[in-house]
Image (spheres, rainbow, N blue to C red):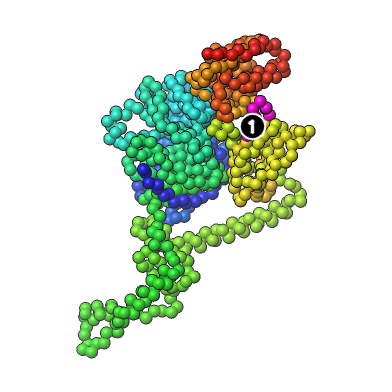
């Protein structure tokens, strides 16, 4: 079994809202220097920070842009990766290590760029559905995905160049070759993150020839899996199920954290959980570290930021916090000052000093001169100056202060920057500087409050730059939905309202108050949840009854003034407890099925829209094939249902008659609005 490791947390800085994957570490130009932290925020600004003697320093700060930074990466020549590239809207910009813009490329894309990879003069981009490849700012290839593209990475798989790999919302990982799809693999969730991975040592990699590549993927329902890629197919490896019902995967990173010669896997989740997995002797990943930052992690990177001797995992959260988890070993527990131990050791020291007779000044009886007299004079004990402050005493790593009220500090350790960081004098200066900065911030807050109170009678704030994001994911194991709400400012309360009956199974870290139904006003379900503490994020579990459809309205009220209410709405479909399945998981494999066949004068696009309104997880884009096929499974009952349709004809097969009846009623309701005549055949039960 792999022993658990300890990573120390360091809160590095607080920036503004981060909605994209806007964090990267710029490698140092010299080996003895630390990496610089590059952050891209929601206001389109790029900020660069470095740490010197434990203090953060701003290297540069670019002006605001019209669109938020959606993706940030490090590029430049292979021998010197010292350039920062980022996307904002449909424009790609490049800045050097001093913050000067040297590159600007307008892609003229109708979609916002969400994925970006830069390698010298080659640029790979992905929008919501479109993928593009540019070389010297000229488009070389493109691809239109069947569903939304959540992540993009490139690596050499098929030979002859780099191959783009797309992680899509329809639960597929797709590998491209030029303008076409080479192969794809279905996984157990919408793919939200992709990363390179290598579970072999260098010697094993040389023996195998390196023909098989490895990648890892993360999904919105919290699953992490491994895939093997070669020139013929994509094969699945190990899969880590989400046993603890944690949040979705927002970032993956491979790095040898444990220093055993094999890369470890770092997983970041949208509920703030940071995990490190190491491979055991069987080749299966085992968790060796887990820590929560209590808010969504947007992106992460690894490098040496605050010291030149220890690696750090640096993460950026939704509210703009930049946090480091360092591999630097914690200080010796004996190095912490204990009042009782301090007095005891000090007493022993005093007794030891008293046992040694104090040497008296040398008396020159025979007027001895020269080197011997000088050496004897060095042994004399100087008289202590009462006006001079006493120095701290160090004994076996324990700091002894003569003043019992003095600030406790640990003994210095060897190692350059570490001495300056743990030295009592240096630590005292840092604490004094932090206190002075806090007082300045308090004074600024007081001044801003005075200015705000002065203009408050003239007007009331009606808009703010703060944002709220939300997600509603089906938990197939529990047969319920996990609703997550997160805001840049601390949340005070959340109000939920729906015209269909819902059940609040778990309110999370909040105090719920359920109101009686009021159908006349369209509030069959109405709940108010008061959030405990100063949390930016709240997660709850809701039960939805199938057969009913409508919307769930969420009102998020912030705690800090001025009070702001964010409105978020989620669509609840008639078969909301069903989830997409693999193409080979047909209803016939589960036993006898029933069939409903619908014919009429409808187009394939119309039927596809009706299927999207019934089932969750169906891509909104109309399939390119002549016949579309989808399979679904109930997360509550485990029954399956399939949909196969083309122009003018659709067939639904399933083992649950209730689900088939819901499909029939939902389609009939949509058709009645358009006035299209349909022919619906009665359910035909297949006893086979």
Which image quarter: residue 600? top right
What residue is pinned by disc 1? 544
Where 214 falls versus 311 (above or below)?
Answer: above
User: Horizontally, is 51 left or right of 618 in the view?
Assistant: left
Q: Relative to the observer, which residue lies in front, 411 or 225?
A: 225
Position of the N terminus by quadrant: top left
Query: Where's residue 437, x and y in %?
Result: 55, 58
- Region in magenta: 543-550
Residue at screen point 68% across, 19% down: 665
Q: Relative to the observer, which residue lies in front, 39 or 518?
A: 518
Query: Where's residue 675, x and y in %?
Result: 72, 14
Residue 38 in view (yes/no): no
**Residue, far front:** 687
Q: Is residue 544 magenta?
A: yes
Query: Where's residue 651, x and y in %?
Result: 59, 14
Where 607 falls versus 573 (above or below)?
Answer: above
Q: Is residue 10 magenta?
A: no
Residue at screen point 62% across, 42% down: 507
Where 463 falls versus 339 (above or below)?
Answer: above
User: Horizontally, is 600 left or right of 167 in the view?
Assistant: right
Which image quarter: residue 664? top right
Residue at screen point 58% across, 59% down: 440
Residue at screen point 65% across, 12% down: 682
Query: Where's residue 211, x and y in %?
Result: 33, 26
Where 197 falls versus 50 (above or below)?
Answer: above
């Amino acid at each position: 079994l792999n022993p658990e490791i300890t990573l120390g947390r360091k809160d590095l800085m607080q920036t503004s809202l981060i909605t994209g994957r806007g964090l990267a570490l710029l490698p140092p130009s010299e080996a003895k220097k630390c990496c610089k932290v590059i952050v891209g925020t929601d206001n389109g600004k790029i900020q660069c920070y470095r740490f010197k003697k434990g203090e953060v320093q701003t290297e540069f700060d670019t002006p605001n842009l019209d669109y938020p930074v959606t993706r940030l990466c490090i590029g430049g020549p292979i021998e010197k990766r010292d350039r920062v590239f980022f996307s904002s809207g449909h424009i790609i910009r490049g800045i050097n290590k001093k913050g000067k813009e040297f590159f600007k490329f307008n892609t003229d894309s109708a979609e916002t760029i969400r994925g970006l990879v830069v390698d010298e003069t080659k640029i790979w981009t992905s929008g919501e559905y479109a993928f593009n490849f540019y070389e010297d700012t000229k488009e070389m290839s493109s691809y239109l995905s069947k569903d939304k593209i959540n992540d993009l990475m490139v690596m050499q798989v098929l030979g002859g160049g780099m191959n783009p790999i797309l992680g899509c919302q329809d639960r597929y990982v797709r590998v491209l070759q030029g303008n076409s799809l080479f192969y794809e693999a279905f996984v157990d969730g919408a793919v939200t993150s992709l990363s390179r991975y290598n579970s072999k040592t260098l010697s094993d990699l040389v023996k195998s020839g390196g023909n098989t590549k490895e990648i890892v993927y993360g999904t919105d329902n919290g699953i992490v899996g491994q895939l093997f890629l070669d020139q013929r197919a994509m094969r699945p490896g190990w899969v880590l199920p989400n046993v603890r019902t944690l949040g979705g995967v927002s970032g993956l990173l491979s790095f040898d954290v444990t220093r055993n010669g094999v890369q470890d896997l770092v997983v970041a989740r949208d509920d703030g959980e940071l995990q490190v997995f190491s491979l055991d002797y069987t080749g299966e990943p085992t968790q060796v570290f887990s820590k929560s930052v209590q808010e969504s992690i947007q992106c992460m990177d690894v490098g040496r930021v605050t010291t030149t001797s220890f690696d750090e995992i640096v993460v950026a959260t939704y509210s703009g916090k930049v946090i480091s988890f360092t591999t630097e070993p914690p200080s010796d527990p004996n190095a912490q000052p204990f009042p009782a131990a301090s007095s005891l050791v000090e007493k022993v020291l005093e007794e030891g000093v008293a046992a040694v007779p104090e040497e008296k000044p040398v008396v020159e009886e025979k007027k001895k001169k020269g080197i011997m007299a000088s050496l004897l004079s060095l042994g004399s004990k100087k008289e202590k100056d009462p006006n001079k402050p006493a120095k701290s005493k160090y004994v076996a790593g324990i700091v002894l202060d003569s003043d019992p009220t003095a600030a406790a500090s640990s003994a210095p350790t060897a190692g350059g920057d570490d001495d300056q960081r743990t030295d009592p004098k240096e630590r005292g200066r840092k604490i004094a500087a932090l206190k002075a900065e806090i007082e300045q911030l308090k004074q600024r807050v007081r001044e801003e409050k005075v200015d705000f109170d002065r203009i408050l009678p003239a007007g009331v704030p009606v808009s703010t730059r703060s944002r709220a994001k939300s997600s509603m994911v089906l938990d197939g194991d529990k047969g319920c939905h996990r609703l997550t709400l997160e805001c840049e400012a601390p949340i005070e309360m959340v109000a939920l309202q729906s015209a269909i009956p819902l059940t609040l199974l778990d309110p999370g870290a909040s105090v719920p108050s359920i109101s009686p139904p009021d159908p006349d006003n369209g509030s069959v379900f109405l709940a108010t949840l008061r959030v405990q503490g100063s949390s930016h994020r709240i997660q709850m579990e809701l039960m939805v009854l199938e057969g009913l459809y409508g919307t769930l309205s969420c009102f998020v009220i912030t705690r800090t003034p001025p009070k702001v209410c964010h409105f978020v709405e989620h669509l609840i479909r008639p078969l909301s407890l069903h989830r997409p399945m693999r193409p080979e998981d047909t209803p016939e494999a589960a036993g006898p099925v029933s069939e409903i066949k619908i014919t009429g004068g409808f187009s394939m696009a119309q039927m596809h829209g009706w299927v999207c309104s019934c089932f969750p997880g169906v891509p909104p884009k109309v399939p390119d094939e002549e016949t579309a096929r989808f399979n679904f499974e109930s997360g509550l009952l485990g029954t399956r249902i399939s949909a196969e349709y083309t122009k003018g004809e659709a067939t639904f097969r399933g083992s649950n008659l209730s689900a088939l009846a819901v499909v029939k009623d939902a389609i009939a309701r949509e058709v009645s609005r358009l006035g299209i005549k349909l022919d619906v055949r009665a359910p035909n039960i297949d006893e086979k």
